[in-house]
């Protein structure tokens, strides 16, 4: 069994992979002050929740939260007994990253791109709907050519609450109508329908510039936003951890594990 761990800005995604098909995946909340022991306890709790009793044979980790990366890596080693591979420069991914500085591409985007390239027809448009919304493009030769980044639902909600005295965070749920009749409904309409329109508009612009055989979407807020989009997106809940597992398998085949 292989443990995959993605450290984001607000949560961590843990996968327990016996194979590409036989897996359990958990999403756990994070905060900036977490210690190595805090993260190790959360990992143990996730293993208990999903009935994972065997000790992982290996581990792979991606992180976009530098202040937590070291503590998370040590926590993984505490729990599994092995040091995790860290997704980054020097690790075989099967992607050819063609942006100006490949080291700037977030490890989570690398993993999602690898998952999409392994599972779906190329060229592919890859969408992530989390605290940030990203759209990335992979061509038919597994070359990653670029990214669009904009604020996601929780960032927008926190920004409204922080900069408008009369507005406060609301529960993210579809409103009854586009034109809200109270503040709560108006905010929800703006965020949900606004982001659905943003996704459709950006996807349309990319489709006008590039050939797209498949559009794959993942992320914590896909189920809130995608039903209100005009385009049909292929929702893949485990795309990120599937990509991490695929990267780990590549190192094994390359005889580096």
Image (cartoon, rainbow, N blue to C red):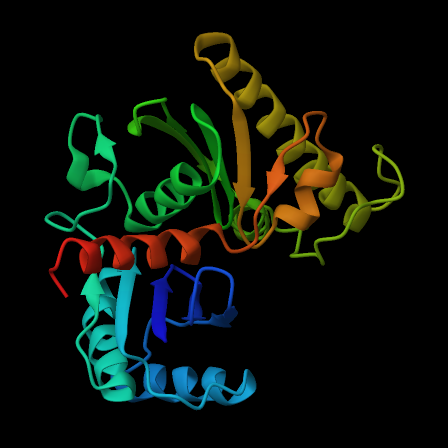
- The percent coordinates of residue 120 (x first, y second) are 48, 36
111 left or right, relative to 28: left
As rendered, which of 111 and 9 lies closer to the eye?
111
Q: Is residue 163 above or below residue 200?
A: below
236 left or right, relative to 120: right
To which quarter of the image does residue 134 belong? top left
To which quarter of the image does residue 61 belong? bottom left
Q: Is residue 3 above or below residue 103?
A: below
- The percent coordinates of residue 124 (x first, y second) are 46, 27
To which quarter of the image does residue 143 belong? top left
Q: How many marks?
A: 0
As rendered, which of 250 and 14 lies closer to the eye?
250
Q: Give the residue at x 17% y 76%.
A: 83
Q: Give the residue at x 17% y 47%.
A: 92
Q: Is residue 43 above or below residue 240?
A: below
- The percent coordinates of residue 73 (x first, y second) are 22, 74
As rendered, which of 46 and 197 lies closer to the eye?
46
Q: Give the residue at x 15% y 32%.
A: 101
Q: Give the residue at x 67% y 39%.
A: 226
Q: Quadrant of the C terminus?
A: bottom left
- The percent coordinates of residue 47 (x first, y second) are 46, 85
Q: Quadrant of the N terminus?
A: bottom left
As rendered, which of 251 and 61 lies closer to the eye?
251
What residue occupies the far top of the structure in this picture? 208
């Amino acid at each position: 069994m292989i443990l995959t761990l993605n450290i984001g800005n607000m949560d961590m995604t843990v996968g327990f992979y016996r194979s590409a098909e036989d897996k359990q995946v958990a999403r756990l909340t994070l905060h900036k002050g977490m210690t190595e022991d805090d993260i190790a306890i959360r990992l143990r709790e996730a293993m208990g929740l999903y009935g994972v009793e065997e000790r992982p044979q290996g581990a792979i980790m991606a992180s976009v939260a530098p202040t937590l990366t070291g503590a998370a890596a040590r926590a993984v080693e505490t729990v599994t007994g092995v040091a995790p591979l860290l997704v980054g420069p020097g690790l075989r991914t099967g992607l050819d990253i063609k942006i100006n500085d490949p080291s700037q591409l977030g490890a989570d985007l690398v993993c999602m791109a690898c998952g999409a390239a392994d599972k779906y027809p190329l060229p592919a448009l890859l969408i992530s709907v989390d605290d940030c919304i990203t759209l990335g493009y992979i061509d038919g030769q597994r070359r990653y050519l670029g990214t669009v980044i904009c604020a996601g639902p929780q960032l927008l909600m926190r920004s409204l609450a922080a900069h408008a005295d009369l507005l406060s965070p609301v529960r993210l749920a579809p409103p009854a109508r586009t034109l809200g009749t109270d503040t709560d409904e108006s905010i929800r309409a703006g965020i949900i329908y606004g982001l659905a329109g943003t996704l459709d508009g950006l996807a349309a612009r990319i489709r006008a510039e590039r050939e797209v055989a498949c559009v794959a979407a993942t992320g914590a807020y896909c189920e809130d936003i995608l039903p209100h989009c005009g385009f049909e997106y292929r929702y893949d809940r485990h795309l990120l951890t599937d990509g991490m597992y695929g990267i780990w398998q590549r190192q094994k085949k390359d005889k580096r594990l």
